Amino acid sequence: MSIAASETSGSAPVAGEKIMEVDGLFKHFPIHAGFFRRQVGAVKAVDGISFDVMRGETLGLVGESGCGKSTTARLLLRLMAPTDGSIKFEGQEIADAKGPELKALRREMQMIFQDPYSSLNPRKTVGSIISDPFVIHGMHKEGGARKKAVQELMDIVGLNPEHYNRYPHEFSGGQRQRIGVARALALKPKVIVADEPVSALDVSIQAQVLNLLRDLQRDLGLTLIFIAHDLSVVRHMCDRVAVMYLGRIVELATSDQLYSHPRMPYTGALMSAVPVADPRLAAAKKRQVLTGDVPSPTNPPPGCRFHTRCWKAQEICRNEDPPLEPKDGGNLATCHFPLTDAEVLERVPTARNVES
Amino acid sequence: MGAPLLEVENLKVHFETEDGLVKAVDGISYTVDRGQTLGIVGESGSGKSVSSLTVMGLTRSRNARISGTVRFNGKDLLGASEEDMRSIRGNDIAMIFQDPLSSLHPFYKVGAQIAEGVRAHRDVSKAQAWDRAVEMLSLVGIPEPRKRADAYPHEFSGGMRQRAMIAMALANDPKLLIADEPTTALDVTVQAQILELIERLQSEFDTAVVVITHDLGVVAEMADEISVMYAGRIVEKADTDTIFAAPEHPYTWGLLSSIPRLDASRDEELVPIPGRPPSLINLPGGCSFHPRCPYVREAHKKVDPKLEPVAGNPGHQSACLLDSSVRRKLWSELRTGVKPDEARADVMAAEEKAV
Amino acid sequence: MAAYIARRLLWVVFLLFTITCITFVIFSVLPSGDPAVARAGRSPSPQLVEVIRVQLGLDKSKPEQFINYIGDILPFVGGNGIYLGFSYQNNTDVLPEILERLPVTIFLATGAVILWLSIGIPLGVLSAVKTGSALDRIAMGIALLFISAPVYFFGLVALYLFDDQIGIWPILPGNSAYGEADSLLGKAEALIMPWCVLAAAFAAIYARFLRGNLIDTLQEDYIRTARAKGLSERRVIFRHGVRAAITPIVTLLGLDIGILLGGAILTETVFNIPGIGRYAFNAITVSDLPVIQGTVLFGAFFIVMMSLIVDILYAFIDPRVRY
Ligand SMILES: Nc1ncnc2c1ncn2[C@@H]1O[C@H](COP(=O)(O)OP(=O)(O)OP(=O)(O)O)[C@@H](O)[C@H]1O
Ligand SMILES: Nc1ncnc2c1ncn2[C@@H]1O[C@H](COP(=O)(O)OP(=O)(O)O)[C@@H](O)[C@H]1O
Ligand code: SF4
Ligand code: SF4
Ligand SMILES: [Mg+2]
Ligand SMILES: [Mg+2]
């Protein structure tokens, strides 16, 4: 172990330090057909993505349904094995981790799921749900210590510790999501992946859970990977955002960069599509409506994957796959003809806002 | 201008259940004019769907107790015979729903499902109805409509299914379209397509639209007028600009400040509404929002506020017992980023002392 | 689709092979009556039994016996076509005996199926549409009665009430009448009571099953859509509700037909109808192992085939199913 590593462990997060490095990651789900069930193709759910996760940051993943967000999350946590590629956690390769190594990894990384209803066992008390990770990893065995640890967690996430013996159905949706958060925090993980944690919640409850996650992330110095389809929520929560399309990252930038000057036309279209809760802004902006549907991930278009729906597409886009590289303003984007500031201003309400 | 197209007056829908009387809709009134768009916003369980299904005569539970009046084109709908309602549904009033996959029959071709609706109201041959279905599919922007009419719903993408639903709803040129969370199950990009489609068709055919949603962004973009529902009642009603610029109900404020906005600063704190929506069986006494309201006073726990016009704007109604001037002061503080508790302290302390 | 059917057929072969193994183990390996003793007749000498053992190949090792057994069953192997064994009790081959009884069993099954579908389906639909009404409650109460009482009980009650010889109201030919009837009409008449008894329990099951399904289906979003289109309630219920709710019945029906073709043991026995079921029942009472083995295999064959047919049918009924 290097000196640097032993020095940093346990101390405050170091800005700019990589906690995870993903390189050339693939996940293909094979499709079988015919008499011998031969493999006739594959759903290319994640198709060659590379990015780093910085310690203590919130990294957002956005994109349309089916673009590979959840699959990426599951790969990062090694809840499934990648088809190819490398994932490093604190410098250590985990893409092919097995058995005890994987179990140790589970203590470092945890997941919060979308549906607070189905992800909790209805026949277990909240206390035993939250203490499950302790049981699995044989922690806090001494009498009473486990209950105390659980009640501390409940307190942290804003649940009444006296409700230790209640069952999930006695809680509201927002509270159930808090239970999920407490369970994820139990092992004091370094990385938490939240997959659509508020999509199933009511508007007024969403804010409670978002605030909780944001506060926890700041107070505990957690690294948070935040998946959502709601772009306003992502902007609110994340320091950096990766935009995915058909299994690829097509743009990666800080939130401020991304929302004030998206460069990839797809990102621009996403942002322009978000309805803004302000009638004047809504009336002023030009809604960029994408035509058609996302092509099948089994057979993604050649060249730039977005060319079938892109209004700026030219001949080169159909043939040459643009690399993820820095564009004007510092965004990393994959595009031969990135959006200009004027084009952005016309379509993206946040750009307008930043400008003024 | 003549009578409004749809007039709902003091509509109540109560369900008798084993646990007690569920007051799903508890006395709501609104009107919709020709070509106009009314937005109804509220959290889940606030009675949005039940109220609109009742307008269509589709609240069929035996345990439902319905009262009030619903008039469409001057004709009373609640008292209408089942046969009369049938001839109105899908013909004069059409409806689309949240989940387009489960809303289409899995065993029938999309074209057949649209054609069936046409033939229910018009005396046309099967072939003519099919042609109409194809025409509608092409109108809502489905490529190769003649071929796609022959496909089954599961062969469509989510957005195409909702387009097909819209094609079905508009096939008989209805005067009113009720869209219950039409885009909630869809991606933003598809949502934008669908919203644009509804707007385009609306202006083309002068259809009135009632759009029901929990998404303030959707109503901001679509609606001319907005009703905010809470626990079975309309608590605030005004034209769209007013609802967003000068809302006068603490619940509306809560909704507006609990969503992150693309047009606000990134560091802005969200202010959640504390607690959760009440059980519709045991509504809190007095103002039903009072257990969650930061500005509640003793009197509000006993007196039930009526939806009344706010001072100076007869088109803007709010059901809150605070004085209009106090509400305006509170909102102007909240808008500058002051927390509800502090706003309360600033604006209401003096008055509270007086009480 | 073709690949799917081919794979399913392989699966059928595998299943039948497994069933054959199991019956072989149960009847040959487990010590349950020595066929040689059965063959040898009353109080045979040990020498005779030994001779018969050799004759029947029972002196060979169990695996060898098994291979011979499989060879007998398979056509084109062992030179004896499909051979299901020999009944020592009756001194006849098993298969021809089964085939001879098959038409009777098919006749019984077909009539019963038609009868129970034409009672069960309308009753289920009616009950679902009028949930909670007096009609629904009475129908479902009676259905529960029919489901819970065993067929032989109802069979005996029916005979006691209506049999033309012993009945209180002697209006229908009953026990043994099928064998005695010589015209087709006479045979059909003889089957009226068995049909009704058999159909009663099945109609009850189908009515309850369909009712439950239809009640669930009528809550579906697409039913709401159908009503919102302004379709008549009739059309909503039949074209949209029943069409979807009845689909799972195909599975049930397929299996039930498969089971019945293997022999309606109780019904055939109570009414003394010379079908496969009674053949099997008689064999059981006298421990005629080859016959039991043969009828079990034969029944299994129908069940496995019917489930294959059902799965293939599904691709036509439900457009979402594609193989
Ligand atoms: N086990 C699997 N087998 C086959 N295909 C799969 C499997 N899991 C996911 N996929 C496919 O991989 C693609 C990416 O799926 P993923 O769940 O990562 O999408 P997502 O971006 O999380 O979408 P959503 O926003 O709907 O959650 C989709 O096309 C999906 O259908
Ligand atoms: N048939 C019914 N029996 C009892 N309660 C019902 C029935 N239908 C709806 N409700 C209740 O009425 C309330 C309002 O429902 P709904 O209008 O669907 O809300 P939303 O605003 O989410 O559309 C909910 O609490 C719901 O549980
Ligand atoms: S590379 Fe071409 S097709 Fe792809 S996003 Fe850029 S302009 Fe559009
Ligand atoms: S009446 Fe009182 S409790 Fe109700 S919303 Fe107004 S201030 Fe709040
Ligand atoms: Mg996902
Ligand atoms: Mg609803």
Image: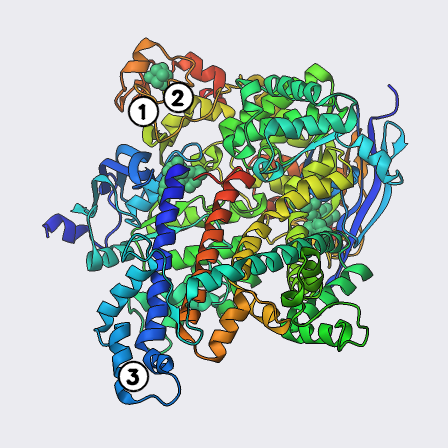
Residues tagged 2 and 1 counted as in contact (Cβ below 8 A): yes
Residues tagged 3 and 1 counted as in contact (Cβ below 8 A): no
Q: Is residue B312 left or right of residue B279?
A: right
Cα separation, mark 2 vs mark 1, equals 8 Å
Chain identifier of the residue bearing label 1 in the image? A
For the residues carrying marks 3 and 1, which lies nearer the camera in this image?
Answer: 3
- Quarter of the picture for ligand 5? top left
Q: Which mark is residue A331?
A: 1
Residue that numbered label 3 is attached to: C49
Q: Residue C102: horizontal and vertical position, in percent?
A: 53, 59
> Picture quarter containing residue A10?
bottom left
Note whether ligand 1 is within 8 Å of mark 3.
no
Residues tagged 3 and 2 counted as in contact (Cβ below 8 A): no
Q: Residue A294: horizontal and vertical position, in percent?
A: 43, 26
Tell me: residue B119, above or below residue C87. above
Tell me: residue A129, above or below residue A325. below
Q: Is residue C13 left or right of residue B262?
A: left
> Picture quarter containing residue C267?
bottom right
Residue that numbered label 2 is attached to: A261
Q: What's the residue type where badge 3 is placed?
A: Val
Q: What's the residue type where badge 2 is placed?
A: His
Number of residues whose C-alpha sits closer than 10 Å to that of mark 1, classed few (under 14), some (14–19) or many (20 or more): many
Dot 1 falls on a residue whose secondary structure is loop
Q: Residue at x 64, y 17 (%)?
A: B135
